[in-house]
Structures are given as C-alpha cells and as structure tokens.
Amino acid sequence: MENKIVFLTFFCMTWALLTGCKNTPAPEPYGPVPAPEQLEWQKMEYYMFIHFGPNTFTDMEWGTGGEDPGVFNPAALDCRQWASTARQAGMKGIIITAKHHDGFCLWPSKFSTHTVRESPWKEGKGDVLAELSQACREYDLKFGVYLSPWDRNHPSYGTEQYNQVFANTLAEVLSSYGPVFEQWFDGACGNETEAPYDWALFHNTVREYQKHAVIFSDVGPGCRWVGNERGMAGETNWSRLDTAGFTPGKNAPPAEVLNSGNRSGKFWIPAEADVSLRPGWFYSSSTDSSLKTVDELMEIYLGSVGRNANLLLNVPPDRTGRIPHGDSLRLMEFKKKRMALFAKNIAESAQIEASSVRAGNSRRFGPANITDKSYDTYWTPEEEKVAASFTITLDREETFSMILLQEYIPLGQRVARFMVECINTSDGLWQPIAQGTTIGYKRILTFSPVTSSVIRVSILEAGAPPLINCIELY
Ligand code: FUL
C-alpha cells in the first residue's frame, strides 16, 4: 500500500512537471516591442552612408541651393564599386543622400528643376538612385534613402504647399527603385526658420509606398538619431523613447535623451549612430589624410553596435564618382581588425548553468540556449526572478578581455544592470571583471585581460525576468 502511494505521488509529480513545462507559455512581452522590420533592421548592425551631390564638387557641407547644376559631373561614377566596397567591408546596406539640404535630386525628379537632369552628367540622362539600387541588388545589400525636408532650392519651401511637394518627391523615390529598408529624415535646417512640416503626411507617404521601411528621424518612429555625429551611443541605451510633445529638428528631445533612450519609454525606437569616416560628410580633397584610424573606428563600433545601436558609417565618393582607394582600404583594415578580435569565441563549447530556469528547469528556457547559435532561443529564470545569474565553465583556463551579451528583444528590453565576475585562479575567489547597465540587442564590454575558466554573469536589475540568448567571450 505504502509503495503504491509513493509510486502514485512520484507519478503525479513527474506528470505535473512534464505537462507544466510543455504548457508553460513564453514570457509575456515587457513594454513596447520591435515590429518585425525593426528587428530585421537591428540585425543589420552596420551599413554605409553615402553623401554625394553638388557639395562633392564645390567643397561645401551645406550647399545654398543656388549652385549651378553644371558642377555635378562624376565622369567615372561607379555605384557597383560603392556596393562592392560596402559588401567587402561587412556592411549590410547603403543609404544615400537622394536629396540633401541644397535640394539637388540625384534622380530626374518631376517635382524639381534642380536635378541630375539639369547636369552635364550622362548628358542629363543619368539617375544615381537607379544605378545604386541596381548595384545593391547585385551585391545583396539593402537600399535606403536620405531625403532632407529642409530644401534651400525649392521655390515653395517654407509655404504650406511645400508639404505636398515633398510628399510627392518622397512618393516618386519610394515607388521607383524597389524595396527601401530605411527612410532617413534629416532634422537639420541651420539657423533658418523651420517650415511647418506635415510629418503625418510624410510618414503616411512612406507607409503607402514602402510598408516595411524603418523611418529614421530624431524621434523615429522606426529608429532614432543617437544625439551626436560621433557614432557613440550612451553606455545606457534603451530602445524605448517617449515622443509626446517632440518633433524632429528644433523641437527634438535633448541629445542626452536621444543618446540613452527612456527606460520606461512608450515606443520602441532604437538608436542609430551616424558618423563619417572623414571629418566632413561630403568628400573634400582637404580631408584625404584625416580619415578615422582603425582604432578610432573600433572605438566607434564598440560604442554603437556594442551598445545596442546600429552603426551608419559615411563613406563619401569623390568627384570622379568613386570611393577613394584610401577610404576603402581603411574599411578593409577595420574589417580585418574586427575579424581578428572576434575570431575565436572561447565560450562556444563551454558548460553552462543558471541560478534558475523558467517552468521547472525546462529545456526550452534552459541556459544551453545562451551558447547555441540561434537568436530565437533564450534562457530565462523562474517567472518571479528578475535578479538571476548564469555561470559558464570553460574546458580549460583562458585569457580574455571582451564579453558580448544579447537579449532576446522580440519580447522587449529588460536588463537594467548586470555584472560579470570570474573565479580568480590564484585564490579561488570571485573577482569582478566588468559591469554594465543595459544590454538590449547587443552589448560588448572590454576589460583588462583576465585568466580564468569560470565566469558568472549576474543580472542585478531588470524590468521583468531577463531573456538572454547569447554570450561570447574573446
Ligand atoms: C545633418 C546634416 O546637416 C549633415 O549635412 C549630414 O547630412 C548629417 C548626416 O545630418 O543633420
């Protein structure tokens, strides 16, 4: 009889545990979450910005709009060279200044008289957007467009009518060159009075012609400016932002807010960090010898991709219409450096244990998901545990100086503070090696080299139980 009871109890408990795991759903989303295209966008991480136009030929950063279109004549223009450079550099797309503040259109727009059509390039028959979008397809890169609402050439700029002109211009671009992954709206307008922009009209136009384009501006709605042109996100960087009362441009949120996001912001608007390889955005021979160094680029990479932001690196073509040799060389050196740094992930085959696992140690939410290669599987602790940790044990002692962590953001950004420790081989005690605040899609921390075989990551503070899906050690 007693045996029977023991057996029955055991059976029921095992049954409850098994069905419990199977039936325990994934955690509820926490706060706003990325739309599918925002997630795809985040996974791109690194792509090219191209500033090109009359400014390239006049040595200006901000053209007046009064330039003679005759100056635009890139005799050896080669968008395939831009695309192959971006591809070899490890970038995933290209965003081009289709229309900068000077109003000059790199395609023969019906809504302007200041375009490639009025230039001598290809006897007025050229179309840079057509060539670049084609080259992007050929090199398997995504294509994006920058259009400045501020237009120093268009006669209707500053009037109510300009809104429709700009919407028409957008529609023309967004319906003519295939899929556009990002629509970049520049908020700048110098010291001039901002026109009464109809942002709702502009956004609706983008949605009408490119449903999946991520819309960039100071306040999104798809992604946000990072608050500086140095390519550096905040050490704390939330992908959430409050936008009520703000607009792009002069009425944007303060730079510090754009740099770090809002911890409990209402909308999912991740940061994009834009920066130029040269001191200016447009090509100038005067900056030929002041390209960013590989070390500077590495710092930028760690400060953007390594801090939950995407990196948009500007590489301006010269007057011939090609990316100068020195610039492309620098991009390749930078890629080589990244590949060397991230060559051997020593955590790849490590043993991994967690302080607790959701749904009674269910494999579906177990710590092995942190070292598998899939972005879609993650470890998460018991439902009520916001503070939790996991420990990895390497096959042998290794020396390392960099850790990479990723959260599973489709269910929201959760981690607000974490710390990394390792067991010191000489005294067997835990020794702190790094600490951070947000993780988000990706966080990379560097520290002075340590040697150990046991490393612990503790989530100390989070809005909801953390969902961690990747750790790498280098
Ligand atoms: C700024 C512009 O004024 C610069 O010329 C450049 O295009 C940069 C990316 O955005 O707001």
Image: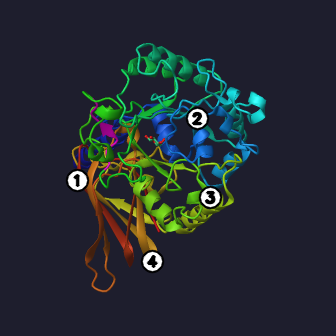
Amino acid identity at mark 2: Glu
Give the residue type at disc 3. Answer: Asp
Mark with earlier residue (2, 3) = 2
Q: Nearer the viewer, residue 471 or 337?
A: 337
Please state which of the two labelled residues, at mark 2 or mark 3, is closer to the viewer: 2
Circle 1 packing at 10 Å, graded few (<14), some (14-19), many (20+), is: many
Tell which tag, 1 or 3, sits nearer the viewer.
3
Residue bearing mark 1: 387
Q: Contact (CB < 8 A) between labels 1 and 3?
A: no
Q: Does residue 32 appear in this view?
A: no
From what the image shows, is residue 113 above or below residue 462?
A: above
Q: CA distance from mark 3 to mark 4?
A: 36 Å
Q: Can see residue 388?
A: yes
User: Which residue has dot 2 on it?
Assistant: 67
Q: Are marks 1 and 4 in contact (CB under 8 Å)?
A: no
**Label 1: which secondary element:** loop
x and y, in percent, of residue 368 in the image? 43, 55
Number of the label disc, if any, that sits on residue 398: 4
Q: Residues within 10 Å of mark 4 (few under 14, many from 20)?
A: some
Instruction: Determine the main secondary structure of the stretch shown in magenta.
Output: loop
- Secondary element under disc 3, as helix, strand or loop, is helix
Closer-to-camera residue (308/14): 308
Query: Closer to us: mark 1 or mark 2?
Result: 2
Q: Which residue is mark 3?
A: 327
Amino acid carrying mark 1 in the image: Ala
Q: Looking at the image, which residue is at 70% across and 49% down?
A: 322
Q: Is residue 360 left or right of residue 309?
A: left
Amino acid type for the residue under numbered disc 4: Glu
Q: CA distance from mark 4 to mark 2?
A: 60 Å
Query: What's the distance in space between the residues labelled 1 and 3, CA to CA?
Result: 46 Å
Specify start and end residues of the magenta stretch as a single range.
Answer: 237-243
